[in-house]
Image: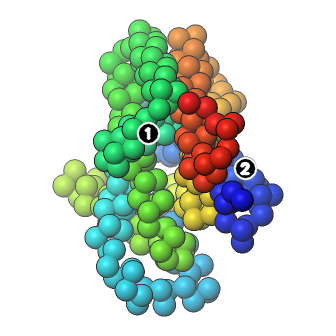
């Protein structure tokens, strides 16, 4: 009998509802960031700091922090710090890209992280990609080139730099998800996310200080944006994704990236009247197709690993 890919303590309906909630909340992130007048790194600092405070409050009510005394947590502190630093770098590069290129271009490029996850699995874990995954990677790269060319032709070097920053953010996001898949199961999700967000906030503050960025921002509108970023895309987005990583295979969580760029692009068109050019739209679609092919192949591979007698998986 095949082993279930879903943790039996969670129903499929619950998983689907959580994924829908996560995607909708993450789609709001780029819009909230663009509404802020603060420097990108300052936004990162407050988003992660408020996120840490909110998750710590939930964890304190649930009395989860006794888990900090467990050997598994003490032995993995260095990895938790590394994951927190990675999250800071992901946010820092992506937030900056949002002020240099379109929301549609930035979000679809940063959400190409499954491509990097697949490649890193080959390099770091020695898990060779199958032919279908390589086809998806090549298609996504072609889409990125089309999108970047459209940006360069329409908005110049600034937009192209924003595209490159978004791609860098995708690399850090892939590393962040790989770390979450490995360590989120080892402790209550409130403890894991509190530590990760707090390390990310401290890391970002360490970057802001030498750059002489004023992080003491208390204007009511900005504070509301920071809190909204902490509540919606962070607590109800990233934290739910980290929780889902303990319940279902990583490719299920990664599939959420296919919904976020679409939602963000629609919101940007409505709120900022930001209509992407033809080349950007084509690149956007091609990237999503490439990512979808990789995710489908990973899902097929995962199913064949759990159920070796299943003949429905692709080659």
Q: Quadrant of the N terminus?
A: bottom right
Residue in the foreground of this view, choosing between 124 and 253: 124
Secondary structure at badge 2 equals helix
First of labels 2, 1 by sequence position: 2
Q: Residue furthest left?
A: 210
Q: Answer yes or no: is residue 148 visible.
A: yes
Total marks placed: 2
Q: Is residue 310 above or below residue 59?
A: above
Colour scheme in use = rainbow
Q: CA distance from mark 2 to mark 1?
A: 24 Å
Q: Quadrant of the C terminus?
A: top right
Residue 240 found in image quarter: bottom right
Taking the spot 64% from the left edge, 51% from the top edge, the residue there is: 307
**Residue under label 2:** 20
Taking the spot 39% from the left edge, 33% from the top edge, the residue there is: 167
Taking the spot 33% from the left edge, 74% from the top edge, the residue there is: 76
> Disc 2 or disc 1, which is closer to the eye?
1
Q: Answer yes or no: is residue 235 visible.
A: no
Q: Position of residue 98 (x, y in %)?
A: 46, 35
Residue in the foreground of this view, choosing between 206 and 224: 206
Q: What label does residue 67 carry, if any?
A: none
Residue 264 found in image quarter: top right
Taking the spot 69% from the left edge, 36% from the top edge, the residue there is: 312
Left/right placement of residue 29 relative to residue 69 reads right
Q: Residues within 10 Å of mark 2 (few under 14, many from 20)?
A: some
Q: Residue furthest right?
A: 13
Q: Position of residue 313 (x, y in %)?
A: 64, 36
Secondary structure at badge 1 equals helix
**Residue under label 1:** 118
Left/right placement of residue 291 relative to residue 28 reads left
Q: Position of residue 61 (x, y in %)?
A: 61, 86
């Amino acid at each position: 009998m095949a082993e279930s890919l879903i943790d039996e303590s969670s129903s499929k309906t619950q998983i689907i509802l959580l994924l829908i909630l996560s995607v909708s909340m993450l789609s709001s992130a780029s819009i909230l960031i663009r509404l802020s007048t603060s420097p990108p790194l300052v936004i990162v600092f407050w988003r992660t700091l408020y996120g840490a405070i909110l998750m710590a409050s939930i964890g304190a009510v649930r009395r989860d922090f006794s888990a900090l005394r467990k050997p598994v947590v003490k032995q993995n502190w260095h990895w938790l710090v590394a994951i927190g630093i990675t999250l800071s770098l992901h946010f820092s590069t992506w937030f900056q890209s949002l002020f240099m290129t379109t929301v549609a271009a930035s979000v679809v490029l940063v959400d190409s992280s499954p491509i990097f996850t697949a490649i890193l699995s080959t390099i770091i874990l020695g898990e060779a990609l199958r032919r279908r995954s390589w086809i998806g990677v090549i298609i996504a790269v072609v889409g990125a080139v089309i999108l970047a060319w459209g940006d360069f032709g329409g908005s110049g070097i600034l937009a192209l730099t924003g595209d490159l920053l978004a791609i860098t953010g995708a690399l850090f996001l892939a590393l962040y998800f790989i770390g979450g898949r490995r360590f989120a199961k080892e402790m209550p999700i409130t403890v894991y996310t509190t530590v990760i967000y707090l390390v990310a906030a401290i890391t970002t503050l360490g970057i802001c200080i030498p750059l002489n960025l004023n992080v003491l921002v208390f204007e009511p509108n900005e504070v509301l944006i920071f809190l909204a970023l902490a509540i919606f895309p962070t607590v109800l987005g990233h934290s739910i994704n980290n929780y889902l990583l303990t319940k279902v295979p990583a490719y299920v969580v990664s599939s959420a990236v296919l919904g976020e760029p679409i939602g963000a692009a629609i919101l940007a068109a409505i709120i900022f009247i930001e209509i992407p050019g033809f080349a950007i739209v084509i690149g956007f679609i091609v990237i999503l197709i490439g990512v979808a092919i990789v995710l489908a192949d990973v899902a097929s591979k995962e199913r064949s690993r759990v159920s070796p007698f299943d003949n429905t998986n692709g080659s």
